[in-house]
Image (cartoon, rainbow, N blue to C red):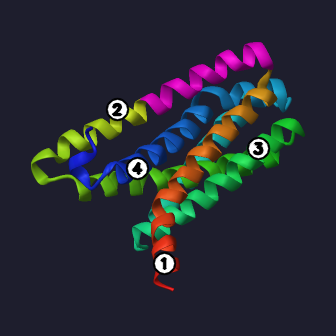
Amino acid sequence: MISAGYGGTAAYLAAAAGTVTGAAVFALFISLAPGFMAQTLHHPSRALAGVIVFAVFLTGTLAQVLTGRLPARATTAIGIMLQVAGVVLLAVSLRNPELAMFSAGGALAVAGGGLLFKTGVGAIAALAPPARRGEALAGLYFIAYAGLAVPTLAMGIGIQHFGAATSMLWFAGLLLILLAMIAVIQYGAPLRSSAQAR
């Protein structure tokens, strides 16, 4: 397995899952947010959609800049919490259409996703032997591209058959499972070690 030489399967899985969740929320806003705003939230203005998408992505950039000096574990924890809060708000906003809630959810989810993507890339770069770092990062970026494409296509198909709100609930549920997996991998072992030490 590609991660075997990079510090273990678990570390690679956590980085890959963080990359997927980050890429998935980015793709959601790039491709689907304008349609959500027009059809579900009843705001058809393309200019407004552009402003909101720009503002949401700006929060992702700012989050990475503002946490630049924090340790990776702290940044990952913040990323998980932001993305959980954002995904929940997104799901609620589509059940109870509200533009402000949708925008806030998107901003939080993308900010969290940006942090998880950053720490994932940093973790793989640190774990991989120098001679194989390019291979490791290429694999991670391949996973990121899959995270951009597959959830978006699945959401598009889901919207056609089940509607936007139901599809968003499934999307949110899958992201929350991935985020829980990252949390268990990153923080479960130290907690178990502390418990055993007692």
The numbered disc on residue 102 is 3
- Expressed as whole percent of the image width and height from the top left, the position of residue 101 reads 80, 48
Residue contact between numbered discs 1 and 2, judged by CB atoms under 8 Å: no
Query: What amino acid is found at the position of numbered circle 1 in the picture?
Result: Gln
Residue contact between numbered discs 4 and 2, judged by CB atoms under 8 Å: no
Q: Earlier in the sequence, mark 1 or mark 2?
A: 2
Q: Between tags 1 and 3, which lies in front?
A: 1
Asked which secondary structure carries label 3, the reply is: helix
Residue contact between numbered discs 3 and 4, judged by CB atoms under 8 Å: no
Provide the residue span drawn in magenta. 146-162
Q: Earlier in the sequence, mark 3 or mark 4?
A: 4
Name of the residue lying farthest toward the bottom: 198
What distance separates the C-alpha of mark 4 from that of mark 2? 13 Å
What distance separates the C-alpha of mark 1 from that of mark 2? 38 Å
| Residue 155 sits inside the magenta stretch | yes
Query: What amino acid is found at the position of numbered circle 3 in the picture?
Result: Phe
Residue beneath disc 4: 15
What distance separates the C-alpha of mark 3 from that of mark 2? 29 Å
